[in-house]
Every structure is written in structure tokens, then in C-alpha cells.
Amino acid sequence: MEHHHLDAAALERLLAADRTAEYNEQLLHLLAVCPACREVGGWLLDLHRSGALPPVYGLVDAALARSRAEAPYLLDELTQLAPEERLASLFADRRFVSWGLCELLVRKSCQAAPEEALDAVHLADLAVHVADMIPGGEPFEEQWVYQLRALAWAGLANARRVQVDLTAAERGFEMADSWWDAGTVGAEDALGYEPILLDLKASLRMAQRRFPEALAPLDQAVALFLEGQPDHRDPHLAGKSLIKKALVLIEMGSSHAALQALRKANGMIDPARDPRLLLCVRHNLVDNLSKMGHFAEAAEHLPALQDLAATHGTARDRLRLQWVEGRIAAGRGAYAEARRLLTVVRQTFLDECNPYEAALATLDLVIPDLEEGNLTAVQSLTDEMVIVFQSYDVTREALAALRLFQEATHRQTATTTLAREVATTLHQTRTQ
């Protein structure tokens, strides 16, 4: 008896039919034992073996998993082209009209944004074009496509935010909201994009210094990542949103609430997925403990943090850790060690022509001298920073705050409390 092997159309019909785990197992067995059928559907077997498919899957699940699996190869091919050639390739080669590629472009844009804002904009702009070219209907529902377009626009808005083009960023989120609203009329969040959009929008509200408006979307994002649809839950991303929430709370002056958010986030970050994010949350935790005066607890976390920074940190990460180490040393009375560490940090910022960070490091550096009553050294360091501030385009408020501390040093009334208050003012004026 002659057996008919699978062809692409037959495989599509099988996947489109009502599926059960048993039926899927039988299909996978056929693909595993029949070389002719495997030539047609081997990709499905590969996806199963890689864990990319749920136990019960159909045509949409398979198409989405296949698209995501192929996306890294498409991205490599696309990024080998000159930037001006990439958009033309999207229109010339339909392979690039890929759901998985669109998602990956957004993800890569968000990853590139902190260091390479221009690349982030280019990647997200490509994502918007890919999303616009994906047709609604088969195999993906039209509203799913609208949700993907919302994700792409949110990615582009985020990249514009990092470019400090807040007007363009706001317009981008208006587009994202419009597509999201159209994509969720009578439908749910199909692929777990909603908390991602909320998290990205919160970043814009932070950049706009609309901090109370940033808290609500972050709380919603955390709740969805932790308690949303089971397939879309992600404690790691919830931890990432909590780190961002802590930054908002610090800007709002709620240090204790920020510390609680960081403690919670510390237990959620998956180091295998993003070791630098683990470094980030632990650095922020220790940094805030030291600023709140919890020096003993901060010191307990230092060894593990130092190991993380040595393994996964950049030179900038290690410099900022040295700054925290100096603050902790000063808080624990190790004044010589504090001066050694903080002098290096301060001078590095001066060499980099970074007046705000140099001034903030100076206000930590003067703490040992204030505690020991060495006001001449405090006055000398402060006078130098005022001269530095006058040579840069710093805000009037920042210069006034530093001059206030300078006058106090000349009157010999400067205190550690005043130094910390001035540091708070400088931090606020720097981020405006």
C-alpha cells in the first residue's frame, strides 16, 4: 500500500484543524521517522525540540514560533547592509516581512537605546515599517497585527525619548495608543505586549518629570507581569519595572518606598537572562542604603556587588561602585579610605568635564573633613567646584545651591546635613 507523504499544504491543513496533545505527538512522530515528511515539516520538529511550542499548538502557534526562530538570522542579514539599504530590502524581499523580526527589532532597539540612541531609532523605525507591511488575516488576526504595530510605535517613541526628542516621543506613544485601542476592541492582549508598552511609556513620563504619572503604568506593568495571563507572566520583567519604579520614587523623595521596591526587585531578576540588570538592581540597592545612612547593611552587600561589577560591569559601572564604596567608608568612619576613593571619583568626573557629577562627588568627599572639623579643606574643595561650575553652562539653581554651601564654608557653619541637602538640590537640577 502506498503512503502519501506530507506536503506544505497538507501540513498547513493539519495544523489548522482542531488539535490535541495526542494529535500533535503523532504528527511529530511522523516527522521524526519519515525523511520525506521531515523535509517538509522538519522545522516544526526543530521548534518542538527547542521548547518553542506549547503542548497543544495549532497553525498560529507554529507560525509565530517559526517566525521568532528565524528572526535572528534575518536580523543578521539585514544589519550587514548599509543603513540606507535596509528599508529598501524590506520592500524587495518578503522574507523580512516577519512578525518575529518586528518583535526582535523592537527588543534590540530598547537594548541599544541607553548607549546608541541613533541605532535605536533606526532599528525601531524598521520595526514600524515591518509591522505596517504585515497583513491582517491569515494566519494572524487583524487585531493582533494592530497590537504589533502598537509595540513597534512604542519602541520608536522610546528611542526618540533617549534622543531627548520628547515631542516626537509623545507623538509616537499617541500612535502606539491608537493602534493598541484598535487592537483590543473586544479582544485581549494576545501576546503580552501591554506591560511592555506601559513600562516604556513610564520612561517617557520620567523624562518629562511627570513622576506621579509614571507610577501608575509601572504598577500596572508589574501586576500584569506577575498576575496576568499565565503564558505572559514574567517575574524578571516585573523586577525590571520595579527598578524603574524605585527611580521614580527617589525623584519624588520617597526613599523608603524606593528601597522596598529595590528589595523586591532583587529577588526577581534572572542573572542568566541579564546579569547586568542584576548588577543594576544591586548597585541601586547599595547606593540607596548608603544615601539613607544604612552603612552597615550596605557594606554587607558590597562583596557580591564587587564580584558582579568585575565580571559584568563596564568601567563606568566600576567607577560608580567606587563612589558608593567611598560613601560607605565615610559613613563607617574610615575617613582615609573614603578620601582615597572619592578623590579618584571626583577627579575622573573633572577630567571628563562632567561638572554635576564632580560636584556631587565633592559633597561626599567633604564629609570626612566636616566630621573631623577640617573646614579649610572643605572650603578649598568647594571653592574649586564653584569655579568649575562658573565655567560651564549649569543651571542658575545649581550654581546658587553650590554657592550657598560655599558661603557656609567661609562662615565655618557648613555641616554634613547641609552638604547632603545641597547634593539633593544638585541631583534634582541635573535631571531637569
Image (cartoon, helix red, strand yellow):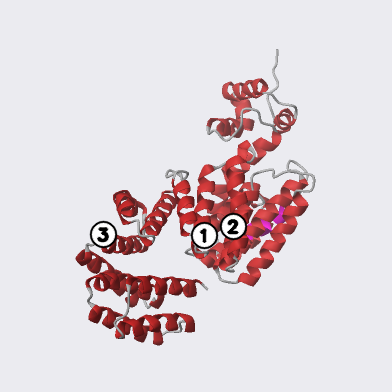
Which SS type dominates the magenta stretch?
helix
- Mark 1 lies on residue: 249
Specify the segment rendered in magenta: 126-134
Secondary structure of the residue carrying numbered label 2: helix
Q: Residue at x 60, y 64 (%)?
A: 205
Q: Residue at x 58, y 48 (%)?
A: 222
> Which circle, 2 or 3, is nearer the viewer?
3
x and y percentages locating residue 70 in the rendered image: 58, 44
Q: Amino acid at mark 2?
A: Leu
N-terminal of the two: label 3 or label 1? 1
Can residue 149 be seen here? The reply is: yes
Question: Residue at 48% of width from left, 75% of height from top?
Answer: 429
From the viewer's perspective, is the residue at label 3 or at label 1 nearer?
3
Distance from disc 2 to disc 3, alpha carbons, whole Å, reads: 34 Å
Mark 3–mark 1 CB contact (< 8 Å): no
Earlier residue among tags 1 and 2: 2
Q: Using the image as rendered, state which of residue 134 and residue 150 is in the foreground.
A: 150
Above or below, 49 against 239 in this view is: above
- Tell me where residue 208 appears, x and y as whole percent: 59, 69
Q: Quadrant of the N terminus?
A: top right
| Mark sitting on residue 215 | 2
Which image quarter: residue 416?
bottom left
Q: Which residue is mark 3?
A: 332
